[in-house]
Amino acid sequence: MEIEAKFVVPTMGIFQRLQAADRLAGFALAARQVKQVRDTYLDAADRPILAAGYACRQREQEGGILITLKGLGGAEGAVHRREELEILLPAAAPPTEWPAGPVRERVLALIGQAPLRPLFSLQQTRSVRQVKRGRQTMAELSLDDVRLTSEGAEQTYLELEVELAAQGSEEELATIVACLQEEWGLEPEPRSKFERALAFLEERLLTPQERAICQQVAGRDDLDGLRARALLALDGGATQAEAGEQAQRSARTVRRWLAAFQRERLDIFSGAALDKTGPVAPDPLPTESKEPARPPVARPVRPTPKLKKPPKEPGLKANDSMAEAARKTFHFHFQHMLYHEPGTRLGEDIEELHDMRVATRRMRAAFRVFGHHLDMKQLRPTLKDLRRTGRALGNVRDLDVFWEKTERYLDTLPPEQESDLSPLRAAWETEREKAREKMLAYLDSDRYAQFKKRFAELLENPGNAALPVLSEKGEPLPHRLRHVAPVAVYQRLAAFLAYDEWVTKSDVPLERLHLLRIAAKRLRYTLEFFEEVLAPETKGVIKEIKGLQDHLGDLQDAVVASNLLRDFLTWGTWGHTQAGSNATTSPTETIVAPGVAAYLAARQSEIQHLLDTFPRAWAYFHSADFSRTVALAATPS
């Protein structure tokens, strides 16, 4: 009897964190061994083995061919209890040539004289780790990167298995199962790999009605048309890579489209695309057949589980060294970055990406605040990777912000004008899809995985990358948080207030106001880093600075949006991408988009309004009240 627990691993990020973990549910995890496993499942033509409730697996391994007859079903949540019979052959052979024993007898009793033939193959990269309690092995943990192939169909997924060892108990397995569900947020997988593969292979993707609609949408020359062509290719048995070639997109993009379709069905298409489809025939009634119809096997759609929610504060103490305060700050925001990564990958809630990007920005800002107390030569690769991560996230986030504000403008229009920005939306969707594809490629890269692993290891131990607290002459250097924090705040405050004489004149350059916003952001981040140890007045100062930062941020967003809209009206593309770098290139045709021109006028009016109201927003920051409040706030409590 085999007893094991099976879980869905929703993202490569969680998969890699599990690979790097040292402990699980209080048990030690031994070093991992990576194995390449190829399984072929066999049955006769009319599937008598499956009908009897078994799966017959042929596994290629050193020393020969392992034939396993596995019972199906028997799952209670994540835990599977199954009958399992095995026989080792020197080479592949028909059952009549197998050695006498339970496997041969059972298989021949089911198939008679019919030959076995392959149903499908599974190729797995398995990371196997022993789950230890002292010297005893309680269980074996396998992290599987699975690829299913059968007659052109292909599916890939990640799965975790924990198989109980002879020295382990079911109570200990239950402890591990609870940890994986509660701390790691994993969802149980009630199906075996065999059952999961059958569900994938035997279900057509599209209903007849959906297929007819997709065939009409596929004629469009836009993102909806590309999605429809990819879905039709998948429905016809193409692999994700082949569907990507037909849609001029990567297999990763097709995989995301497929996941979205399984959640939303035809709602993945825009209203404009569906409105233009003609009437389609209803799904046909079932016809009589000599063989009973096989009921469809539904693929369950599970929400993407989240990691355990990180703490609300980093836990700084006034007597911490600056190096230890830096470690706590980095660890706090690193946890937030990892927490929001699954949602960022999924792409359903744009706030997940926003929060992940904010976490990377906070860590980069922390390097500026704490860098004088850290070995930056050792940390320079980490800082470079943080910048690279921030850029990958930022390109998509900037596009999200653009359309989020565009939707606010659309809300002000009468219903008959809501489609006036359709050409702009189509260009935006294409650009965002490209940016998101690049972002996901980076998040799936070895470089990003190594960055997370390296940074996590660095943050584990206090004192890593800390500089000495005595000079070469033996003189003590300021390094306690309570001593250094007020100085750091006043340095940022001075850089912020230095703009006063330059932004209170008439006709202030927009670039200078953008630089003021950056200075305000750095002051705010510094106050937020030290908020736990500063006076209660700090919260009010942060709120005032955030208000100014939002004002200047809206101004910068309006400036960027205006430039993009002008480019679109000139070239008909997003960000002048087709014009290239040659500034002398002229548009080949006139772009007629009155709705976009009206939107450009609205954004320029917004710029003027924000400029007119800036002096009032800035006035408080060069007042005596602000100076007194900052003086009170910067005193450690």
Image (cartoon, grey):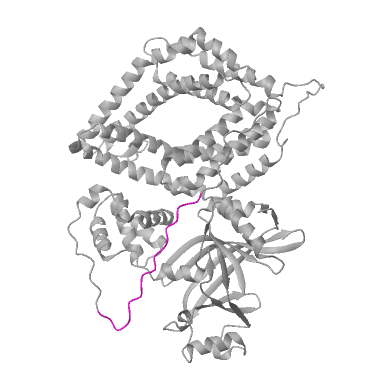
Write the residue at 22% across / 40% down: 419
Q: Nearer the viewer, residue 76 or 434?
A: 76
Secondary structure predominantly adopted by residues drawn in magenta = loop
Residue 577 relative to residue 462: left or right: left
Residue 31 relative to residue 260: left or right: right
Note whether 27 is above or below 387 in the view shown: below
Which quadrant holds the C terminus? top right
Q: Quadrant of residue 464?
A: top right
Residue 152 visible to an observer of this rendering: no
Residue 294 x, y percent position in the rendering: 35, 75
Note whether 258 is above or below 199 in the view shown: above
- 43 within the magenta span: no
Note whether 194 is above or below 109 in the view shown: above
Residue 373 x, y percent position in the rendering: 69, 27
Write the residue at 41% across / 41% down: 350
What's the magenta region? 288-305
Note whether 164 is above or below 48 in the view shown: above
Q: Residue furthest top?
A: 624
Residue 433 visible to an observer of this rendering: yes
Residue 59 relative to residue 199: left or right: right
Q: Nearer the viewer, residue 592 or 626?
A: 626
Write the residue at 48% across / 91% down: 112
Q: Nearer the viewer, residue 184 or 273?
A: 184
Q: How many marks?
A: 0
Residue 51 x, y percent position in the rendering: 45, 81
Which quadrant holds the N terminus? bottom right
Write the residue at 32% across / 56% down: 265
Residue 254 x, y percent position in the rendering: 39, 56
- 294 within the magenta span: yes
Q: Residue furthest right?
A: 474
